[in-house]
Image (cartoon, grey):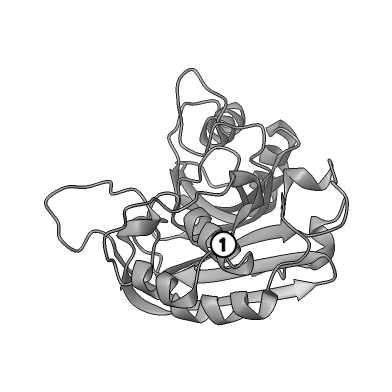
Amino acid sequence: MNIALIVEYDGTDFNGFQYQPDSNTIQGEIEKAIEKFLKSKIRIRGAGRTDSGVHAKAQIITFRTVKNYSLNDVINALNYYLPAAISVHDAVIVSDNFDPRHDAYSRQYRYTMYCGDQESPLNNRMALKVPVNLNIELMKEAVKIFHGIHDFKNFGKISSRGKSDITIREIYQSALSVKNEWIFFDIEGNSFLTHQVRMMTGALLSVGEEKLTLDHLKYMVDGNLLTKSVVKLPPNGLCLIKVRYPDHLLRYKEEQIEYSEYRA
């Protein structure tokens, strides 16, 4: 029995998703909860390895069990054992060969910025404080440059060698929206390089501060070599919103993200 879990977490106090023997990680906490429930050791698989301090609204993980449990029992038991910062929202039975990482066709992230007049210590867990007087219209033009297939070597780490196309990614949609003192950068793509969204948002912020022109941003997105690295923003504003799969592999309820979720 292969079970997929839809998991939400506040990543502030964790050293990322991926298990590390001497660190507090999301994967480690989920595996401990499942082991208490099943009374046996297991290893889970995740759709993405979020960095330290990065959050998720709908991370997808899978685990196997030889016993048949009701999905409600699985959800309730795991939420009983999990810390308050991690919650299982749903559970779905999937095929034995389902892979939450490789079977996904897109991932959607949101980077949240707060441009209020004063610092907000509570909001700092989920949003980055940015200057008040940003050029929002220029930033909205800038996000259009990300759309399509590009070489994003200037916006992330290269994890493999010997592949000329390793930094090429396709962005399906990217948008900037504003709600009162909140700025949201939403982006969906087939996959992302390490730190890519945080660096793309850093470039957007530079455009809004009028420190970076649209022409220069396009030059960067086209994969031209730079003499100066792109700013990588802190992880607290970044959230994995959803992971999408072909319907025949996994269907789950996609919850809408309300602006109020980012308010203190």
Could you say whether the residue bearing mark 1 is in a helix, strand or loop? helix
Taking the spot 51% from the left edge, 42% from the top edge, the residue there is 51
Between 204 and 68, which is closer to the camera in this rendering? 204
Question: x, y percentage for residue 88?
Answer: 66, 48
Question: x, y percentage for residue 133?
Answer: 76, 66
Taking the spot 44% from the left edge, 54% from the top edge, the residue there is 230
Question: Which residue is the extreme one toward the left?
Answer: 162
Residue type, label 1 = Ser
Between 253 and 197, which is closer to the camera in this rendering? 197
Between 223 and 26, which is closer to the camera in this rendering? 223
Whether residue 242 is visible here, answered yes or no, is no
Whether residue 151 is visible here, answered yes or no, is yes
Question: Which residue is the extreme one toward the top?
Answer: 22
- In the image, residue 124 above or below residue 230: above
Residue, disc 1:
206
Q: Dot 1, crowdedness within 10 Å: few (<14), some or many (≥20)?
A: some
Taking the spot 42% from the left edge, 56% from the top edge, the residue there is 100
- In the image, residue 215 above or below residue 183: below
Question: x, y percentage for residue 199?
Answer: 48, 55
Could you tell whether 146 is left or right of 110 in the image?
left
Taking the spot 39% from the left edge, 57% from the top edge, the residue there is 155
Toward which corner of the image does residue 236 lie, by quadrant?
Answer: top right
State how many labels appear: 1
- In the image, residue 44 above or below residue 153: above
Question: x, y percentage for residue 121?
Answer: 83, 41
